[in-house]
Amino acid sequence: MLTLHIACSSTSDIAFSIMWGSILALYWNALPHSLLSILYKVFHAAALTLCMALPLQLLLLAADMAGTMHWSELRPILPDVLATHAGSVLLSQFICVFLTSLSSLLPLGPWSRRSFSSALLLALTTFKATAGHAASDGTFSLREIAQWLHLVSIASWAGGILLAAWFILPHLDRESSMPLTFLRRLSFQCTLFLALVFLSGASNTWLVTEGQLAPLSSSTWGTLLIVKIAFVLFALRIGFQNRRDIQGELTTSTQAVVIKRIRLEALVMLVILCASGWLSNLSPT
Amino acid sequence: MRKSSLLAIALTLLSVPSAWAHAHPKIMVPAADSAGPAPAKIIVTFSEPVEAKFSSIVLTTEKGEPLSKEKSVGDPSDPKTLTLTPPSLATGDYLVHWTSVAPDGHKMQGEYKFTVK
């Protein structure tokens, strides 16, 4: 059951990050027109992935609450599960991603499509921010705002890297100046959101822990967290090396190294997102 | 302190996910491992709000035999609290089994003992 929980949470987090990465790339990464349709396809594919992951998360939630995995016992309690805070938030998220997936079939112009997608992603993020313990303080609390900022910054950082490594860099003409322009903008985006990760994470931690850090060193949760931090440090190191290398003119060989590093960073990001999915299903005490 | 140590501490703080707080019993009436007269009500207040429909407190004998079919109820004015009205309790040891489901759906279970003198 825990494995399924982790798989679902991680898949959702990866898809959510890719949605944020795609939207940001659509707005300001100055990509060629041919790439825009790929970005929309990636965005909608991520939404579709969430469309499948969220109902599974709801079933797992119901199974957790009921203490059974039998469908015959789960079915009657589903309305009660949907009435809980966690259930209603999952349903709201599902409606957002379902509408997002549906919008890919609508004959919308570029501006309308982008605006509609952005609005739904913002709504999805808002519901996601209320899904965790941030909800304990009630609706529209400071903890939820900190959580919202934290989600956006992590998704934009991770999503930017995943999108670049898997979908953008393989399609950019390496002989043109396009890779350098894109890499500089990506580097700026990652630096900006990393700063936001620090700020929102610090306030989030302060609001959630009230200064009690003992579980960090005395549980499986703490050990996993340390492993995650090691990977975050590794990703930071890769990002720093790339940022340094793209300051000047980019030779073909340096460009190849930078692109290779981004692919490695994407793998590290996957590990970080999976570790986060695992951590969110563990108790620190 | 070296820069790398500061960075590690900062990252530790920043990487703490939202799973920090699960709903643990914070105030228990009667208190865990206490001895006293038979209680009219068993009240457990958790560290954060719980979903009353899926959270419960059940009273059993020390051997785990249930004492009544009465279900615990949530307090509408305090979503962190569950209350159970027990039957008349004779002298002896009793176990309170608690199950909490936090607003994020995380479930926790546990038990504690009290003695009626």
Image (cartoon, rainbow, N blue to C red):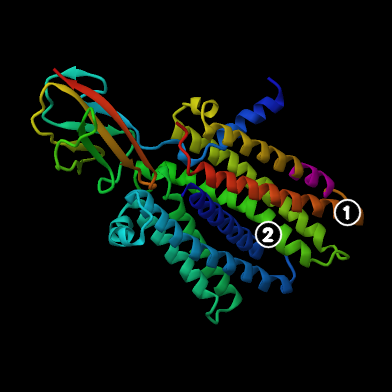
Q: Is residue B65 magenta?
A: no
A174 displayed left or right of A139 = right
User: In the displayed structure, would residue A75 be above or below residue A275?
Assistant: below
Say which residue label 1 marks: A250
The disc at residue A159 is: none
The percent position of residue A258, horizontal first and vertical second, equals 82, 51
Number of residues whose C-alpha sits closer than 10 Å to that of mark 2, classed few (under 14), some (14–19) or many (20 or more): many
The disc at residue A163 is: 2
Number of residues whose C-alpha sits closer than 10 Å to that of mark 1, classed few (under 14), some (14–19) or many (20 or more): some
Q: Between residue A44 and residue A240, name the one nearer to us.
A: A44
Looking at the image, which residue is at 49% across and 65% down?
A52
User: In the displayed structure, would residue A175 be above or below residue B91?
Assistant: below
Query: What's the magenta bit mostly, secondary-structure-wise?
Result: helix
Q: Which amino acid type is marked by label 1?
A: Leu
Residue span colored magenta = A239-246
Q: Is disc 1 placed on a helix, strand or loop?
A: loop
The percent position of residue A17, horizontal first and vertical second, equals 59, 55
Q: Which amino acid type is marked by label 2?
A: Leu
Q: Nearer the viewer, mark 1 or mark 2?
A: 2
